[in-house]
Image: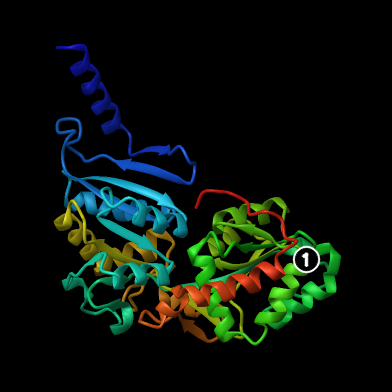
Amino acid sequence: MSTRGWLSGLLAVLLWLVNSLVFADGTSQSTHVIFPSASFHTKPQGAVLSVYGALNRQAITPLFKAYQNKYPDVSIHYTEANTRYLYEQFLSQPTSRPDVMLSPAMDLQFKLANDGYALAYESPSLEGLPQDSHWRHELFGFTYEPIVTAINTDILAAETMPQSREQLLNLIRNKNHLLDDKIGLFDIQRSGLGYLAWAYDGQQSRSYGRLLEAFGTHQARLYTDTSAMLNALLKGHIFIAYNLVGAYSYQWSQQYPWIKTLMPTDYTTIIRRTAFISRDAQQPILAKRFIDLLLSPEGQHILANQSGITPISTQVNGPYSRDELSKLPHGIFRPIPLGLELLIQTDDAKKRLIYHEWDNAMLSAPNPVPSMP
């Protein structure tokens, strides 16, 4: 056997022995995870499903394992990054687009689908899901997740835990300079989800302007993802984190009791992670099979029981099901609609206006904290 052949065989065996291979790209803005097929040691050049996602790889791994149980000859290449980065990578690399795109930035996903980048697919798994969970058989909502606020209760002292945005403003006012540089927010110019949640606040919240003023006055720290904010909250770098992804925040609250998560009682924004098959997919059949699993009762059950993510289906049970979510204290659930109105958020004039308001308020805020999703 040649040296090259021997090395190739050794590499194949090593990859087969591990559950996945994780490596960061040169920009440190994304992580790539390889889930080798069961037959990778004998067929290293087998079929590969490529997936882009802003979903924590620990959360999506159970879905990938279920997929590979059905299709053991398929390897999966997962690229994990924040929503804005994935969107820009998708547009900038037309020859290497993924087969499947997953993201909670509903407006960016909708724009890509509306601009013709999504492949239409009438999945049989749509039966039994809410009617508003998909758009034109091109964009598929698969989760139902609250946007929340998290607080390190060490800051409260004699104060009670705020439940609404108005009470949060009162807490910030009462603590005053103790919260200077101690509030965490999404950087809306670097996070697609952060921009969407903040823009929706502008439509729904009567306290929008006062919140923006308070965040700017107290020199809020800016982050590109939920995990970075939760880490900062845990370490005491910040005491309040606003507009986080609820699935991650509630898991941290279970692990660290002094971090409390709340769904604001004035209203609770609901986002839906969405998926589409790329029009340029190299493996469209494999991609369709993945969408089928994702939307199926099996896939939705995995989300509710193994991934820690609330599924879109109302028919599945589990600790993270919609039924269990509804039992937690919350305001009126206000899901961001999956429809043409999302294009308003991507309109350049609308974005410039929101960015202008944001920049004026955040002029003295620290630079965004770079991190992984």
Residue 99: percent from left, percent from top: 24, 55
Looking at the image, residue 272 sits to the left or right of residue 98; the answer is right
Q: Is residue 117 above or below residue 212?
A: above
Looking at the image, residue 195 sits to the left or right of residue 152; the answer is left
Q: Is residue 262 above or below residue 152?
A: below
**Residue at which label 1 appears:** 218
- Residue at left offset 25%, top offset 66%: 118
- Residue at left offset 58%, top offset 76%: 353
- Residue at left offset 84%, top offset 74%: 174
Q: Which residue in the rendered view is the most extreme toward the front?
A: 349
Mark 1: amino acid: His
Residue nearer the viewer, 108 or 273: 108
**In the rendered image, is residue 161 in sight?**
no
**In which quadrant of the rendered view does residue 207 lie?**
bottom right
**In which quadrant of the rendered view does residue 267 lie?**
bottom right
Q: Which colour scheme is used?
A: rainbow
In the picture, which quadrant includes the N terminus? top left
Residue 44: percent from left, percent from top: 19, 33
SS label for mark 1? loop
Q: Is residue 12 above or below residue 234?
A: above
Residue 311: percent from left, percent from top: 37, 70
**In the rendered image, is residue 303 in sight?**
yes
Residue nearer the viewer, 329 or 87: 87
